[in-house]
Image (cartoon, coloured by chain):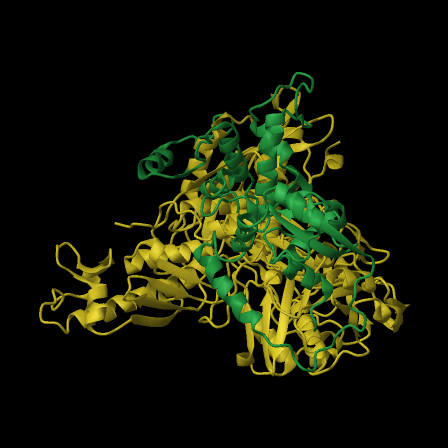
């Protein structure tokens, strides 16, 4: 009987967060701190002809100004500067600041002003003057689709069956293009770092989804062993993918600290965020669907093209997950990119999947109307229990249950499919649905579990908590399997002193780090049993490890009243603590199966026909993602997914002036994200799956899943409400009038 | 680096030696000598700390020992231009500071007095993360010049709890999971606490139906709460929890739980149910 798993637990870091005590990267008090302020380019492509820092250097409080002219060069040239054939051999191609006079994108960093105070640095930054040899930037994906290419031309897309022939022969087909603009993560906490050196040892407080990634990046940037770099990131004020890849500011901050031999703090302004950490790329997609009159899909052809920077081949895996969703015998999907003079994109919540599923699930809705079949029924008709590419069965896939339960909860049976047929007063009402899909990933991850004879446990792993509740769920898992009260467990993360963990991304943290803690706790139990069995009175002499459990500070023989007090046992053996450092890896068993997390989303929109304003008045998330560890925080994840889906569907767009390659709305006034008044009823239902193939805890992760179907569900609901099929996100009022 | 004058001013607050006779009298009248001031200093060190904060505090203490490098570069002219002296109260304790005239209240809190609970999200008044209360009203501290705070009473997130006793709004945010990453949370909570007073005053909002017919001590509807909280962005999207927390503290109204596990019975029932949509045209061919 689980004591904690599946039950609501309030966040263990809640107290720290509501009292303002949680410390984010730029908030650590470091003595003798200098402030850095970044200066960015005003052109989108070309070279810096001259940069004049005289006036800035003379401003009160200024310590110095770093530019490409005086930036020390400890590392070999960065990837953007290299010839293509050399560039290919560089693993970390991320953009590095101030290493040359080349401009690759507008608002690229060109100088860093260092001063005694933030105000002084900010002021002097405005005194740095640059002149350029300007070239015309190309930033428009849609005018350059013909330049798209595969990231790996030696591996062209592989068809399933014969999609072209099947498409030509089908009695019912739809074909449409879908576009998604650049979107920015816009976490509330701006990226920032504090760096200082002690000899050749570097310490960096950073906002990061993976401290080991930052450590490696800094080690290669400065040609120092990774062991010389400590990266600390205990709290992250949202990231959503923007702190996964190495960003340019930690190395810049560390270099500044080395040059002036003082701790330096650099924090992006909100504007600098728009070119400082990547973005969801501008994506063009074309989906062709063909079906028999019964609704059975016969062909799926899905092309995707997204923009990348001029120096990295960033391709969104837009088509990978949609390709596997339905039982369609013939499919051809391809994802390509176009080089543009923008900074490099980055994963952004549900990367690829939410973009691809927007296109596929809108196309399915269009097909449902073409077939005159209910959209939900069309999905049930094409349901598959096996991965249509590999033929492997899913380890679990309760998606049908999600469809059915969601329909029932939503009241889908009362939907009149006719567009504009439902009203609430003068408002047009639309009901739409879509499917969510995400992987059930597990990555190798390590954790250290120390059970102490004073009745407490200390658990650590260098994972992150960007908001999903990692502190809480890891505490919960450790408490459950060590048989302790959660208050007795302290879990720490976000520090390269802790065992290696993967980045917090892909919704695989609980599956990966949670499994490491679970297995380490099993090892601790084994050690305790071995200790107990050294004593004559042990009740476990003939027991197998599976016959025991840890509960309330005791090792218990299941189904009996026999037990041993583990802390007394440890003290008898003079053991102040029992430690296990363990790495959990995905099991071989997984390879026999297809794995994934699934969900169904139902939304109601109300559209004002006079203004074109869309409100999402109701959203239901039904989710099948294995075992739910903590429904309280899981529910919050799903709510967050809906809110993100609403933003993507109705509001979010980074606007680029293609004449200059410059982002026009790099702020939260003109880049719209949902606010409280935009959010109405959101309900969640968890359809639990018992799946020990995916990992020993049976968890699949949900941070991204909850968002995946929402933009399509909203677009489909808007069609139902208005009769207008908007295939270009976001669905702003002007498109409905 | 030598301590600059500002730092000395701040440090000097401990023995009160930098207070003028008038200031001493003023603060005495306000009851801010002795215990109260010690309370302020105590707040920022030991009290009201969860286990997390203890670890972080230890980390900072270790950092404080960091010796300056002998080769450290200093600005040739570190002195402030246009320095402005301000005397203000922060969470009940007087602070006399000499600040850069360009310094925002937000940076004063975060960079000068070490109260990093107040967050910088956009630094241009568009996100609400920096919300604090000045004389009981919520303001955006990033758009408030520190120099304009002379004589003002500033309350930050650090000033809401009484010892270990959380403010009801703080407790409600935890209960309703009104946050995820926690970065907008101090601003949300300060905004919400000020909102309680606005409701007591009967202040109108954009969605108030009849601005003339309002009384005092109004119970805010969900729509009113959402409207009044829309200056505080939460990118994690914890809005439903935030609204539920405020509703519960403001009017005592409980929000119904909006999550559930699908029970085995319910799954069985749904899977045996034939038609999924009688409104659709084909309801017979169901899997």
Res A736 → quadrant: top right
B20 displayed left or right of A372: right
Front position in the image: A141 or B276: A141
Q: Pick the residue in front: B273 or A382.
A: B273
Q: Is residue A225 left or right of residue A186?
A: left
- Which residue is at a point 82% across and 64% down the rendered structure image? A124
> Can residue B129 be seen in the rendering of this structure?
no
Q: Position of residue A684 (x, y in %)?
A: 46, 39
Chain coloured green here: B
Q: Is residue A366 above or below residue B33?
A: above
On screen, residue B75 above or below A562: below
Residue farthest front in this picture: B21
Q: Quadrant of residue A474?
A: bottom left
Residue A35 x, y percent position in the rendering:
71, 66
When asked about the image quadrant of residue A515, the answer is bottom left
Residue at the location (21% across, 59% down)?
A554
Q: How many marks?
A: 0
Give the farthest residue toward the left. A536
Pick the quarter of the image with the C terminus of chain A: top right
- Visual hue assigned to chain A: yellow
Residue A441 visible in the picture = yes
Direction from residue A68 to residue A154 in the image, left or right: left
Picture coordinates of residue A411, whole percent (x, y): 47, 28
Q: Residue at x 61, y 68 (%)?
A: A30
Work out whether residue A378 or residue A243 is closer to the camera in this orientation and state it: A243
* Image x and y of residue A202, in percent: 59, 77
């Amino acid at each position: 009987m689980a004591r904690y798993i599946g039950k609501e637990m309030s966040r263990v870091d809640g107290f720290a967060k509501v009292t303002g005590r949680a410390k984010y990267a730029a908030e650590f008090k470091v003595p003798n701190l200098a402030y850095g302020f970044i200066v960015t380019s005003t052109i989108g492509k070309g070279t810096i002809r001259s940069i004049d820092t005289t006036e800035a250097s003379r401003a009160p409080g200024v310590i110095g100004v770093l530019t490409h002219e005086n930036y020390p060069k400890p590392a070999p040239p960065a990837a953007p500067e290299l010839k293509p054939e050399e560039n290919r051999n560089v693993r970390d191609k991320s953009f590095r600041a101030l290493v040359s006079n080349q401009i690759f994108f507008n608002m690229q960093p060109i100088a860093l002003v260092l001063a005694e105070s933030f105000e002084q640095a900010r002021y002097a930054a405005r005194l740095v003057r640059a002149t350029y040899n300007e070239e015309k930037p190309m930033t428009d994906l849609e005018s350059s689709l013909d330049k798209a290419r595969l990231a790996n031309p030696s591996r062209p897309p592989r068809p399933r069956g014969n999609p072209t022939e099947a498409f030509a022969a089908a009695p019912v087909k739809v074909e449409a293009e879908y576009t998604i603009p650049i979107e920015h993560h816009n976490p509330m906490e701006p990226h920032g770092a504090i760096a200082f050196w002690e000899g050749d040892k570097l310490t960096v407080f950073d906002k990061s989804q993976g401290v080991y990634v930052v450590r490696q990046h800094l080690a290669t940037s400065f040609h120092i062993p990774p062991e010389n770099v400590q990266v600390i990131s205990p709290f992250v004020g949202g990231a959503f993918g923007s702190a996964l890849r190495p960003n340019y500011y930690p190395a810049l901050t560390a270099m500044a600290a080395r040059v002036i031999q003082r701790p330096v703090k650099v924090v992006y302004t909100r504007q600098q965020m728009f070119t400082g950490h990547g973005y969801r790329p501008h994506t063009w997609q074309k989906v062709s669907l063909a079906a028999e009159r019964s609704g059975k899909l016969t062909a799926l052809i899905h092309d995707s093209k997204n923009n990348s920077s001029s120096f990295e081949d960033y391709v969104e895996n837009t088509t990978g997950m949609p390709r596997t969703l339905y039982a369609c015998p013939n499919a051809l999907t391809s994802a390509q990119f176009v080089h543009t003079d923008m900074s490099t994109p980055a994963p952004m919540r549900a990367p690829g999947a939410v973009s691809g599923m927007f296109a596929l699930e809108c196309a399915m809705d269009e097909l449902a109307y073409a077939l005159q079949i209910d959209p939900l029924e069309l999905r049930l008709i094409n349901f598959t229990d096996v991965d249509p590419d590999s033929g492997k069965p899913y380890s679990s896939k309760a998606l049908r249950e999600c469809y059915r339960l969601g329909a029932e909860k939503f009241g889908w049976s009362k939907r009149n499919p006719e567009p504009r047929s439902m009203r609430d007063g003068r408002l047009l009402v639309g009901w739409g649905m879509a499917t969510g899909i995400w992987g059930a990933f597990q990555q190798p991850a390590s954790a250290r579990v120390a059970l102490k004879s004073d009745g407490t446990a200390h658990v650590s792993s260098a994972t992150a908590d960007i908001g999903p509740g990692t502190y809480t769920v890891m505490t919960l898992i450790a408490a459950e399997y060590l048989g302790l009260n959660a208050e007795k467990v302290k879990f720490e993360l976000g520090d390269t002193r802790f065992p290696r963990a993967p980045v917090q991304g892909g919704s695989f943290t609980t599956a990966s780090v949670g499994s490491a803690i679970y297995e380490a706790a099993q090892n601790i139990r084994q050690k305790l049993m071995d200790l107990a069995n050294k004593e004559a009175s042990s009740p476990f002499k003939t027991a197998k490890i599976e016959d025991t459990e840890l509960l309330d500070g005791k090792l218990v023989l299941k189904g009996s009243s026999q037990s041993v007090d583990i802390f007394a046992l440890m003290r008898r053996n003079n053991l102040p603590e029992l430690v296990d450092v363990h790495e959990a890896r995905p099991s071989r068993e997984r390879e026999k199966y297809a794995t994934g997390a699934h969900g169904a989303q139902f939304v109601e929109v109300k559209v004002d026909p006079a203004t074109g304003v869309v409100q999402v008045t109701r959203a239901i998330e039904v989710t099948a993602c294995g075992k739910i560890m903590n429904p309280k925080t899981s529910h919050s994840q799903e709510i967050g997914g809906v809110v993100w889906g609403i933003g993507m569907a109705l509001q979010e767009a980074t606007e680029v002036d293609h004449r200059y390659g410059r982002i026009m709305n790099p702020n939260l006034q003109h880049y719209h994200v949902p606010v409280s008044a935009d959010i109405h009823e959101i309900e969640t239902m968890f359809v639990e799956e018992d799946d020990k193939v995916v990992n020993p805890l049976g968890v699949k992760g949900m941070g991204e899943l909850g968002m995946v179907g929402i933009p399509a569900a909203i677009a489909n609901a808007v069609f139902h409400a208005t009769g207008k099929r908007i295939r270009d996100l976001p669905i702003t009022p002007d498109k409905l009038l | 680096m030598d301590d600059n004058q500002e730092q000395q001013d701040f440090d000097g607050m401990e023995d009160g030696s930098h207070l003028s006779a008038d200031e001493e009298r003023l603060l005495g009248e306000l009851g801010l000598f002795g215990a109260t001031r010690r309370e302020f200093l105590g707040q920022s060190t030991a009290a009201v700390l969860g286990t997390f904060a203890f670890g972080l505090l230890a980390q900072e203490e270790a950092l404080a020992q960091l010796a300056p490098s002998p080769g450290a570069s200093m600005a040739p002219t570190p002195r402030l231009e246009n320095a402005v002296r301000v005397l203000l109260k922060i969470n009940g304790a007087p602070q006399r500071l000499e600040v850069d005239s360009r310094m925002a209240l937000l940076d004063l809190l975060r960079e000068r007095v070490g109260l990093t609970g107040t967050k910088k999200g956009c630094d241009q008044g568009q996100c609400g993360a920096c919300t604090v209360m000045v004389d009981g009203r919520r303001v955006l501290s990033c758009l408030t010049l520190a120099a304009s705070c002379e004589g003002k009473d500033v309350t930050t997130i650090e000033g809401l709890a009484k010892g270990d006793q959380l403010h009801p709004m703080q407790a409600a945010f935890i209960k309703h999971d009104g946050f995820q990453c926690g970065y907008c949370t101090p601003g949300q909570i300060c905004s919400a606490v000020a909102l309680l007073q606005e409701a007591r005053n009967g202040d109108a909002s954009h969605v108030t139906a009849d601005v003339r017919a309002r009384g005092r001590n109004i119970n805010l509807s969900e729509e009113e709460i959402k409207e009044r909280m829309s200056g505080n962005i939460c990118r994690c999207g914890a809005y439903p929890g935030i609204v539920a927390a405020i509703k519960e503290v403001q009017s005592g109204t409980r929000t119904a739980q909006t999550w559930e596990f699908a029970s085995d019975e319910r799954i069985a029932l749904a899977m045996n149910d034939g038609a999924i949509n009688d409104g659709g045209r084909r309801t017979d061919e169901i899997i």
